[in-house]
Image: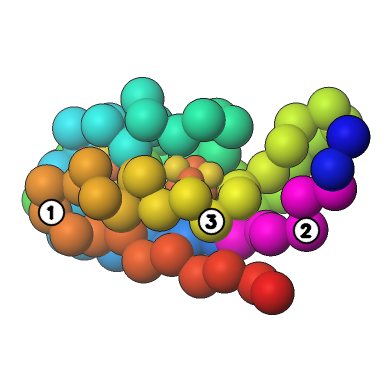
């Protein structure tokens, strides 16, 4: 199996987020969850899972979450 060294991370602007969760639906590796703390607008925003559990793949920097976000709240960073 080819080793995929491309890893990524995202930041989510929790105050911009409207809680539509399209990003959660689209993420292939389940790296985004719903925050338990509401933002100032009263939405439960999306939250990036910084740490992956055993067996989870982690963020690959595919940017699908950023493309799908209607509020442009997500930025993607890719590690080389
Ligand atoms: S797609 Fe954007 S607005 Fe929707 S839950 Fe994700 S970060 Fe929030
Ligand atoms: S960049 Fe891809 S893998 Fe990373 S959180 Fe967004 S959708 Fe998931």
- Disc 2 crowd, CA 10 A, few/some/many (<14, 14-19, 20+): few
What residue is pinned by disc 3? 61
Tell me the residue at 65%/72% (across/down). 79
Tell me the residue at 30%/53% (across/down). 66
Q: Which residues are magenta?
A: 3-8
In the image, farthest residue toward the bottom: 80
Tell me the residue at 40%/53% (across/down). 63
- Disc 1 crowd, CA 10 A, few/some/many (<14, 14-19, 20+): some
The quadrant of the rendering that contains the C terminus is: bottom right
Earlier along the polypeptide chain: callout 3 or callout 1? 3
Nearest to the eye among marks 1 and 2: give it: 2
Q: Which mark is residue 71?
A: 1
Nearest to the eye among marks 2 and 3: give it: 2
Image: 10 above or below 56? below
Q: Which mark is residue 5?
A: 2
Q: Which residue is nearer to you in this view: 2 or 53?
A: 2
Q: Which residue is nearer to you in this view: 48 or 55?
A: 55
Q: Which residue is nearer to you in this view: 51 or 67?
A: 67
Give the secondary structure at mark 1. loop
Give how far across and how far down residue 45 sits, in percent. Answer: 30, 44
> Is label 3 in contact with label 1 (beta carbons under 8 Å)?
no
Residue at disc 3, CB closer than 8 Å to ligand 2: yes
For this view, does 47 lie left or right of residue 53? left
For this view, does 71 lie left or right of residue 28? left
């Amino acid at each position: 199996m080819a080793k995929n060294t491309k890893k990524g991370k995202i930041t989510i602007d929790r105050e911009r987020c409207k809680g539509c969760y399209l990003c959660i639906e689209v993420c292939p590796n389940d790296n985004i969850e719903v925050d338990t703390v509401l933002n100032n607008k009263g939405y439960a925003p999306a939250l990036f899972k910084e740490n992956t559990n055993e067996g989870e793949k982690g963020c690959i920097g595919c940017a699908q979450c950023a493309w799908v976000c209607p509020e442009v709240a997500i930025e993607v960073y890719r590690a080389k």
